[in-house]
Image (tube, rainbow, N blue to C red):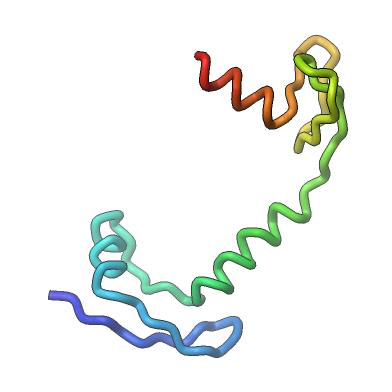
Amino acid sequence: MYQDKTLVCRDCGNEFVFTAGEQEFYESKGFTNEPQRCKSCRDARKMQGKNDREMFVATCASCGGEARIPFKPREDRPVYCSECYSKIRENS
């Protein structure tokens, strides 16, 4: 049986609760280590990697608008903005 645990974040030093439900989820995924960071520090760490990405600007092949993409576009492949890409995925 799991019980809530209070852990200390390795980044900010604040205490956070590792709930019984989270512990059960960790076990179901095969994770053996407890989390080392609180939710806000984990989220900030994830976003840091995304913010460091180089973004490229291209013209959307569907609407002609601006598309910001994390890869260098090639001339032989169409590029779509977020809205057009979402519509294409819904229809497939």
Q: Residue placed at 42% from the left, 73% from the top?
A: 35
Task: Specify whether 75 is left or right of 44.
Answer: right
- Residue 15 in percent (x, y) is at 46, 89
- Residue 92 in percent (x, y) is at 50, 14
Residue 69 lies in what quarter of the image?
top right
Residue 71 lies in what quarter of the image?
top right
- The one nearer the camera, 50 or 83, is 83
Question: Which residue is the extreme one toward the left?
Answer: 1
Residue 24 lies in what quarter of the image?
bottom left
Q: Residue placed at 24% from the left, 74% from the top?
A: 20
Q: Residue placed at 63% from the left, 67% from the top?
A: 44
**Total numbered circles:** 0
Q: If the image is split into quadrants, where does the N terminus sit?
A: bottom left
- Tell me if residue 24 comes above or below residue 73 in the rendering: below
- The one nearer the camera, 57 or 52, is 57
Task: Specify whether 56 is left or right of 17.
Answer: right
- The one nearer the camera, 6 or 86, is 86
- Tell me if residue 13 comes above or below residue 62 in the rendering: below
- Residue 45 in percent (x, y) is at 63, 65
Q: Residue placed at 37% from the left, 73% from the top?
A: 34
- Tell me if residue 14 comes above or below residue 62 in the rendering: below
- Residue 5 in percent (x, y) is at 30, 84
